[in-house]
Image (tube, coloured by chain):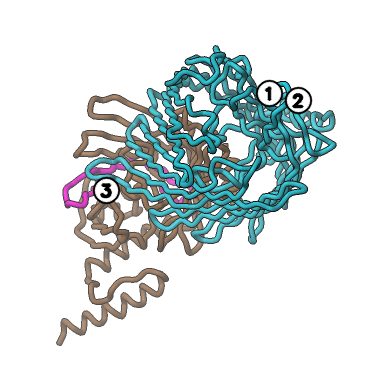
């Protein structure tokens, strides 16, 4: 831990003593209101609430653009659920370009993959589950990584130092498991617990119309299993896993074809498989307007069963993105995913609209329709909600 | 049989010029004097601009609607010339603030569809996107994607129309017919001055053949004693009553960019 801090701080000191370098502080402040449609399953849970958030990012380039320091932080204050008051240092890293490779040291966020409705291959960062249940918000991951770009592709090696536990909504919060999660009672499969060093390797390449990725991860699973304790609470259990992933996209005119698959092997258990694939097709300049309409279909398959089962075992997701292409960039995104085994349906509507150069309005509505008892979304069956967020960028 | 002989002669000359241009193909039978002269002028304009290597600039885009309301976009661009293919370019958006840090990488191809990727900073995600959106508006402006893409000789067929003098300059007037069936235009008329081969004015006709937009370039500066660049471009949409003004600043040639500055990896690092 101390070594890591020194690694990051030394170049920071160097950066601050340089002159004539590119640097910038940016960010936004947001105000969010959420209202739930139905009464909660647990009377302790709230019906509506407001929260405020702040996001800051700073970067500084020096050494002729061959070195960079990045720091970013996020925090939220919630009126209803004290567990949702949270903050994270999403990024604090140093980057240096050498002649034949690049080095990153510090806390980073890394995204892998191509599909839209599920991110199977993306394994480096822990979800920021308090921010959103869609898994697109992440917590920063401490790491040292090397990147090499050659004619034959890009190779990245990651040493992931220190595990980030998932945080869960409190008893008052909505969008949670039927029982609150006791994060302090966490159990790890590895004796080294959160100090276990994880490894990851990724190869990616662009071949004409094809974007290809192949990756492997070995270490602590980011997704915990929730185990019932004798106190009537859930406790998170983090297994050791090996996961190999492949992601492929081919871009053919108006059509984008996307596919991701993982082979998932928990220590001491059988190998399991999950995949997601489909297409995105865009109709540009509809009728006399300048709007465009994107259509999305993805099929999700997952043979993980028992404690490992996910909500996407045999599901089809259909979506549409309608962009007005006006000055305000008004955009509507609707996606509905249906479980083909039990009929559970999850619907998601997002609208974004720019008010002016610095103000942005976002709306999000989610519905857990027809949730079957056997489907993980059953826990969220009364948690349909509407959310509005106003952001001011600076 | 004089006429047919002259036609055959042109066919041979066309074949020679097609070979010289590589990958440029034109049906010899359709070729006539006006087409040949049109292509010669377009090729000469392209030749005069070849060899710039790389360049960077900053640009401010001011969008005005018919009520005079303005909104401003700012971005920075980097371009790397490619031998035997279209340019590679990188655009980093600074304004509006909600898209700050979004970056766009494009490999233009003389023939076939371009390769394009978008970097979304909130998700740290690089996304390959479809490049077939030609006629849609770029950033909500009156410039469409095909207007801002790198202009390659091979993307049009040409007709020389006439010479025309205005603002004290003599111009070639060419008619351009886009090769791509997805283009939003039936034809374009372009005014290129006869001394320096700079494009001063373009009229864009929609698919129905009606005049849709006019682009006017001004404030030309010459760089490296060779390359002319306009510092101001005004696009007026006659049908919608809207306009977009582009102001270019800080043209820098010979930055020393390499292909490594135009990859998915460098896109994800663009600031």
Q: Residue under circle 3?
A: B202
Q: Marks 2 and 1, how far apart in space?
A: 10 Å
Residue A97 placement: quadrant: top right
Q: Is residue A21 left or right of residue B9?
A: right
Q: Which chain is brown?
A: B
Chain letter for mark 1 = A
Residue B55 visible to the viewer: no
Q: Main secondary structure of the magenta part?
A: strand
Can you identify the residue that label 2 sits on? A185
- Label 1 sits on a secondary structure element that is loop
Q: Foreground: B29 or B52?
A: B29
The boundaries of the magenta stretch are: B204-228
Q: Which element carries disc 3, helix, strand or loop? A: strand
- Residue in the foreground of this view, choosing between B197 and A92: A92
Q: Which residue is mark 1?
A: A233
Position in image of residue A29 (x %, y %): 52, 19
Quadrant that contains the N terminus of chain B: bottom left
In front of the other: label 3 or label 1? 1
Where is residue B208? Give x, y as percent. 17, 51
The one nearer the camera, B46 or A80, is A80
Letter of the chain that mark 3 sits on in the rendering: B
Badge 2 or badge 1: first in the primary sequence = 2
Residue projecting furthest to the top: A79
Residue A159's quadrant in the figure?
Answer: top right
Tell me what hue chain A is rendered in: cyan
Instruction: Choose between B215 and B47: the one closer to the eye.
Output: B215
């Amino acid at each position: 831990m101390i070594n890591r801090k020194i690694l990051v701080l030394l170049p920071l000191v160097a950066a601050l003593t340089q002159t004539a370098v590119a640097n910038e502080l940016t960010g936004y402040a947001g105000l969010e209101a959420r209202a739930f449609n139905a009464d909660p399953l647990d009377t302790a849970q709230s019906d509506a609430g407001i929260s405020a958030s702040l996001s800051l990012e700073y970067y500084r380039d020096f050494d002729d653009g061959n070195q960079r320091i990045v720091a970013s932080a996020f925090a939220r204050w919630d009126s209803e659920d004290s567990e949702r008051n949270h903050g994270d240092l999403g990024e604090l890293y140093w980057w240096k370009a050498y002649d034949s490779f690049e080095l990153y040291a510090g806390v980073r966020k890394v995204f892998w993959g191509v599909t839209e409705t599920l991110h199977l291959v993306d394994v480096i960062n822990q979800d920021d589950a308090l921010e959103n249940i869609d898994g697109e918000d992440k917590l920063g991951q401490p790491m040292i990584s090397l990147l090499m770009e050659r004619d034959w592709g890009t190779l990245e090696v990651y040493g992931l130092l220190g595990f980030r536990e998932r945080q869960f909504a409190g008893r008052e919060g909505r969008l949670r498991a039927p029982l609150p999660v006791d994060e302090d009672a966490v159990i790890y499969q590895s004796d080294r617990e959160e100090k276990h060093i994880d490894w990851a390797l990724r190869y990616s390449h662009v071949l004409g119309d094809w974007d290809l990725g192949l990756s492997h991860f070995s270490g602590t699973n980011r997704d915990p299993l929730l185990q019932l304790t004798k106190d009537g609470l859930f406790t998170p259990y983090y297994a050791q896993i090996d996961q190999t992933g492949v992601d492929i996209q081919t871009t053919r005119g108006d059509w984008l074809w996307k596919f991701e698959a993982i082979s998932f092997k928990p220590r001491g258990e059988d190998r399991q498989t999950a995949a997601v694939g489909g297409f995105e097709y865009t109709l540009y300049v509809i009728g006399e307007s300048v709007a465009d309409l994107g259509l999305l279909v993805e099929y999700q398959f997952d043979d993980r069963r028992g404690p490992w089962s996910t909500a996407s075992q045999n599901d089809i997701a259909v979506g549409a993105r309608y962009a007005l292409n006006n000055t305000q960039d008004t955009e509507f995104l609707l996606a509905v995913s249906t479980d083909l085994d039990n009929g559970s349906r999850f619907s998601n509507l997002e609208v974004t609209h720019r008010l002016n150069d610095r103000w942005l309005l976002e709306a999000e509505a989610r519905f857990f329709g027809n949730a079957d008892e056997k489907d993980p979304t059953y826990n969220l069956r009364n948690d349909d909600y509407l959310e509005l967020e106003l952001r001011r960028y600076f | 049989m004089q006429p047919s002989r002259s036609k055959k002669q042109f066919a041979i000359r066309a074949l020679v010029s097609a070979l010289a241009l590589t990958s440029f193909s034109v049906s010899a039978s359709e070729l006539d004097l006006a087409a040949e002269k049109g292509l010669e002028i377009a090729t000469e304009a392209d030749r005069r601009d070849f060899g710039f290597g790389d360049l960077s600039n900053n640009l401010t885009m001011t969008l005005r609607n018919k009520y005079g309301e303005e909104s401003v976009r700012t971005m920075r661009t980097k371009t790397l010339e490619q031998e035997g293919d279209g340019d590679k370019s990188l655009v980093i958006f600074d304004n509006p603030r909600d898209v700050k840090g979004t970056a766009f990488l494009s490999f233009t191809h003389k023939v076939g569809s371009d390769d394009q990727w978008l970097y979304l900073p909130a998700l740290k995600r690089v996304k390959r996107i479809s490049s077939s959106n030609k006629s849609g508006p770029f950033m909500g402006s009156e410039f469409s994607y095909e207007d801002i893409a790198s202009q390659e000789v091979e993307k049009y067929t040409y007709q020389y129309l006439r010479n025309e003098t205005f603002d004290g300059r003599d111009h070639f007037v060419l008619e351009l017919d886009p090769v791509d069936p997805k283009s939003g235009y039936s034809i374009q008329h372009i005014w290129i001055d006869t001394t320096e081969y700079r494009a001063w004015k373009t009229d864009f006709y929609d698919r129905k053949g009606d005049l849709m937009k006019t682009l006017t370039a001004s404030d030309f500066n010459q760089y490296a004693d060779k390359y002319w660049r306009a510092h101001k471009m005004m696009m007026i949409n006659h049908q919608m009553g809207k306009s977009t003004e582009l102001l270019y600043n800080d043209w820098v040639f010979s930055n020393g960019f390499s292909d490594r500055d135009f990859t998915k990896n460098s896109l994800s690092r663009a600031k």
